[in-house]
Amino acid sequence: MTIAPSVPPVASKRPHSFTTHGITIEDPWAWLRDPGYPKVTDKDVLDYLGEENAWFEAAMAPHKALTDALFEEMKGRIKEDDQSVPQKDGDYVYWRAFETGAQYRKWFRRPVAGGDDQLILDEPMLAEGHDYFRLGAMSVSPCGRYLAFAIDTDGSERFEARIKDLSTGEMLPDTIPGTLSSLVWTSDSKGLLYSLANENWRTDNARLHWLGSPIDSDVELFHEDDEGFRVSIGLTSSEKWIVVATGDHVTSEAWLLPANDPLAKPLLVSARKPGREYDVDERDGALYIRTNDTHPNFRLVQAALDTPDQWAEVIAPSDRFYLTDFTLFKQFYVTEGRDDGLDQVELRDYDTHMAKRIAFPEASYSASLDDNPEYDVTKLRIGYESMVTPDTIYDYHLDDGRLEVLKIQEIPSGYDASLYATERLMVPARDGTQIPVSIVYPKDFKKDGSSPLHLYGYGAYGIAMEPGFSTGRLSLLDRGFAFALAHIRGGDDLGQQWYLDGKLDKRTNTFNDFVDVAKGLIDRGYTAKGRISISGGSAGGELMGAVINSDPDLWGAVVAHVPFVDVLNTMLDESLPLTPGEWPEWGNPIEDKTAFETILSYDPYNNVKAQDYPPLLVTAGLNDPRVTYWEPAKWVARLRATKTDDNVLLLKVNMGAGHGGKSGRFESLHEGAEEFAFILWQMGLTG
């Protein structure tokens, strides 16, 4: 019998320091990085992580009934035998479905001309025997006979690509290990383009595999020499051209290959220029290009195939409208973007380029194109949701502008939207900038400072926080919480400048915005100091680390998922998978002393101090290639050794998973239940 620990583990201090730009950094928990990474075999490291997991289990054991109740609530809101809305693509209609009790989906198709349903991919079968399973890229060949797909069975995000003959159900011997990309077919269905991850988990190549040939004879079509750039592969909307794109967070470049002749000389659209991003599509010999060359909110330009770098403006840039995407169809095209932060989907004519906006029924929502695989269409598949409206799939009919509801997310245990209210607020930051906040709460919520509130944030990489729906979130709302999304700088919620104002030397705006949103919500009576729980993951976990260092007394409970908290050490280590590509986001502290000092000023790990900290739950993944496991482990070790309170500090390390935590819909639900149980326990709301 294993005896549960009665005290938390203590990671030993082992002297380690380094000096950069004349500044010496002490790092006594550097030993938690296994020198053999990405293999983790060091006994001391594994023993310590095991002790942390044992402490997590022991601390949560008295709250098992609450965790189980939350899990059953969350599970009860999921339709177990759910399936997607079928969509036509060529000669077949495709859909995916869960069976009751299944962790993973099955993928199906049926001939448009009539015939039996065909199971084309069985995720539960592929996942059998694995603690972790994730389906990556998948693509049916143009002839409809072959399915290329990629799987990851340990969370390391090094996928194995396989090919299935759908006419026989047999797997072909063509197996490609170590992929990290989409899978793109040539137009004759005889070749497959992909990218391999190199030893540093970077995609610096585009390769071509001919069906039936040995993998070692595959042809490298493109190689990227800049260690900070990543290569991706896609198809134009007409499927006439293969797009090989390369770029980092601020600069991009694209090449075109004929889909019917991938060995032809690639066509360079426009050579890379530092700070300029663009993406490209093609229609009838004309290139359409979205670019930020003259304005951070992007514009749309057009060019001819024979002069691809001579651009003529089609849609001018705007301070107010942020052009986030465009999609070409045969008879029209669609632009997507945000107007004052609110999603817009617009249909445009190729001759006039005038916009016709699709009208949606609520004042605050999330909307975008959904699955639209065909080039010549008479209706568009649209996805829509809000903080009170479950995920809804529409067909937008081009002839009469009608939105036809195809599916509304079903919640078997019941859901009544009238029991909840949502608002969009503007809260001033300390520099006067107005920060948007999306908030949902029970209709009987009292704004007198007595209620608990959960605040979520991310604020990095230009990723916006969409005001969407969550069935899990209802477990907090039904216990009296408000739930708020802080649209802080660092995301692109209000345009590209919003992103630029939260990165590099302006990074602290992100942290200050989050704190100021919390204080603004307190001032307006939504909650009170110490009645706020907060959470964030990855770069949002860095946010958690920064705000508990700066304002620890604001928070009643904190959850940091796979937190990027050892920022300085990671940005100094160019051997790590993401580091060179991340310098445009965070700065290069190796070459730039100012960047070094800026990162050091906010780095959560290096700024832990002797003070009281709020209760904290931290997660990590042993196989995580994005935020390596030792970042949260080192951070927890330093917090334990430094903080002056007796508040609970827990670290849960998924020993067989990566950045996204456990796989499978019920396993991930259970982790959500653990998170909410921790929050309710620490906020004194378990009764």
Image: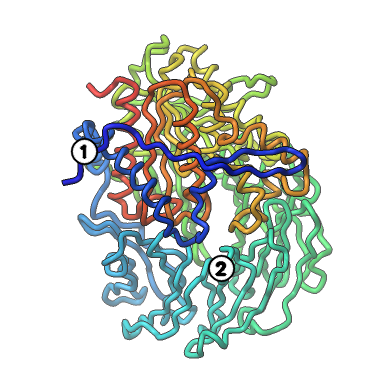
* Front residue of this view, candidates 655 and 555: 655
Q: Which mark is residue 530?
A: none
The 10 Å Cα crowd at callout 2, few under 14, some 14 to 19, many 20 or more, is many
Q: Amino acid at mark 2?
A: Ala
Residue 52 picture location, percent across and down: 36, 41
x then y, percent, for residue 231: 64, 65
Instruction: Work out whether residue 73 can be spotted.
Output: no
Secondary structure at badge 1 equals: helix
The outermost residue toward the front is: 15
First in sequence: mark 2 vs mark 1: 1
Q: Which residue occupies 58% across, 81% down? A: 208
Q: SS class of the residue under badge 2?
A: loop
Mark 1 Cα-neighbour bin, 10 Å: few <14, some 14–19, many ≥20: some
**237 or 291, nearer to the observer:** 291
Type of residue at label 1? Asp
Q: Residue beneath label 2, please?
A: 197
Of residues 29 and 524, which is closer to you in this image? 29
Q: Which residue sits furthest top? A: 448
Give me the residue at 64% from left, 68% from top.
204
**Which residue is rendered at x = 44% and y = 31% of the image?**
640
Left or right relative to 306: residue 343 = left
Against 469, is 426 above or below? Answer: above
In the rendering, which numbered label is found on residue 68?
1
